[in-house]
């Protein structure tokens, strides 16, 4: 295993992962940074371009859809983890009840409404 494998994106898509990340809208980049799921920036950019070109969504609507999907996938990961944990729903009643992931903003940890 050479040293370059750590810097190469996992996706079979060609391109620079850092440039793809920078080309995404700010709110999508923030959601990717906060996410629990490891997203490929090349795949996220490809999906964003698909929403803009093929689905003909406006930029704000496309970004909003991506952010919602990223957060929905995060919540699905937490739920899947809670179900596989030995105590499952008993240990994570808020997850079993279908609560969403609590987002925090700022250095004081104030819940985002």
Image: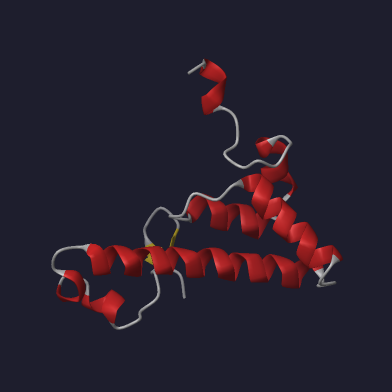
Left or right of residue 86, residue 30 in this image: right
Q: Quadrant of residue 68?
A: bottom right
Residue 8 in view of the camera:
yes
Q: Residue 30: x percent and y percent?
A: 57, 54
Residue 111 in view of the camera:
no
Q: Residue 22: x percent and y percent?
A: 70, 43
Q: Residue 109: x percent and y percent?
A: 37, 60
Tally of numbered discs: 0
Q: Quadrant of residue 90?
A: bottom left
Which residue sits at x=14%, y=64%? 86
Which residue sits at x=45%, y=56%? 106
- Most foreground residue, 14 or 39: 14
Left or right of residue 62, residue 32 in this image: left
Q: Given the current orientation, which residue lies at the most extreme top position?
A: 2
Q: Residue 17: x percent and y percent?
A: 66, 38
Which residue sits at x=48%, y=56%? 35
Compared with 81, 34 (above or below) is above
Q: Quadrant of residue 18?
A: top right
- Most foreground residue, 113 or 31: 31
Here the colouring is: secondary structure
Which residue sits at x=19%, y=70%? 88
- Most foreground residue, 60 or 13: 13
């Amino acid at each position: 295993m050479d040293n370059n494998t750590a810097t190469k994106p996992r996706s079979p898509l060609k391109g620079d992962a850092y440039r793809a990340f920078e080309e995404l809208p700010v709110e999508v980049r923030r959601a990717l940074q906060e996410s629990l799921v490891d997203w490929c920036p090349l795949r996220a950019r490809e999906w964003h371009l698909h929403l803009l070109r093929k689905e003909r969504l406006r930029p704000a609507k496309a970004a909003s859809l991506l952010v919602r999907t990223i957060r929905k996938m995060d919540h699905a990961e937490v739920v899947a983890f809670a179900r596989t944990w030995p105590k499952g729903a008993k240990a994570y009643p808020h997850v079993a009840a279908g609560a969403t992931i609590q987002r925090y903003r700022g250095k004081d940890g104030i819940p985002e409404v």
